[in-house]
Image: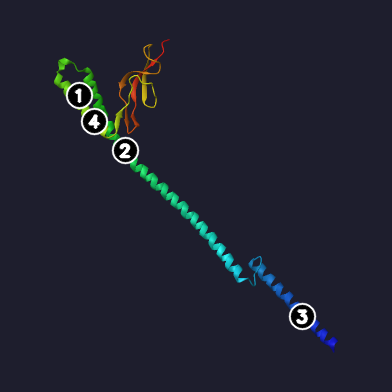
Amino acid sequence: MLRTWLQNRKGEKDVNKKHSEEHHEELAEIVDGVGVDHIVVEEDPLSVLQAALEEKESEAKINWDKFLRERADLENLRKRFQKEKEDLFKYGNENLIQEILPSVDNLERALEHAGDDNGAAIIEGVKMTLAMLLASLKKFGVTTIETKGALFDSAFHQAMAHVETADQEPNTVVLEFQKGYLLNDRLLRPAMVTVAKAPQ
């Protein structure tokens, strides 16, 4: 009787094993059909929560990095706009000043060619007009470029000719044809000059 019971138990185990193998085969077919590497039947709830927390932390870090980049871009844009505004304020009158400069040139030439025969009153009037124009330009940040006895600087001077002379050091300004001007320390117009060179 004991032998019969053991045989029955063995038969049940064989049947259960067979059913289990068949069940695994069915699961494998389903997995292959949907293209999934593995199916988790049961998971520890703590592990699930930990994985979700790590995912959210990673997402938060990515969003924080995006926020910092956007903030930096916005700050750079603000600085650029501020600089453009300042440049517009400092250099916005450049075209107007360039239109005024020829008048200054003509007044200076008139003074150079005026003689006592033309009347002291005319000379005095021209001097006053020139002084007023230069004062107005100075209010807008216009200053003249010094040339007399200065070393030639291609950033501020335009050489019109070279003259051999032993009276002045080579590469110094000998004569000024036309004055140069700066607008808030930026070149507005170079000075046209004659430059000394050593005698041959």
User: Relative to residue 73, is residue 113 drawn left or right?
Assistant: left
Label 3 amino acid?
Val
Residue that badge 3 annotates: 15
Q: What element carries label 1?
A: helix
Q: Residues within 10 Å of mark 3 (few under 14, many from 20)?
A: few
Residue that badge 2 annotates: 90
Q: Distance between the residues labelled 1 and 2?
A: 28 Å
Label 4 amino acid?
Ala
Q: How crowded is mark 1: few (under 14 residues within 10 Å), some or many (20 or more)?
A: some
120 versus 98 height, above or below = above
Q: Do the residues labelled 3 and 4 touch (CB within 8 Å)?
A: no
* Residue 160: % across, % down: 36, 20
User: Relative to residue 55, is residue 70 drawn left or right?
Assistant: left
| Sequence-first tag of 3 and 4 | 3
Using the image, tell me which numbered label, if any, was put on residue 135.
4
Q: How far apart are marks 3 and 4 (CA)?
A: 113 Å
Label 1 amino acid?
Lys
Label 2 amino acid?
Lys
Residue that badge 1 annotates: 127
Residue found at x 22% / y 17% = 113
In this rendering, the label closer to the viewer, 2 or 3: 2
| Sequence-first tag of 1 and 2 | 2
Q: How far apart are marks 4 and 1 (CA)?
A: 12 Å
| Sequence-first tag of 4 and 1 | 1
Q: What element carries label 4?
A: helix
Residue found at x 84% / y 87% = 2
Q: Which residue appears farthest toward the bottom when viewing the image?
A: 1
Q: Residues within 10 Å of mark 2 (few under 14, many from 20)?
A: some
In this rendering, the label closer to the viewer, 1 or 3: 1
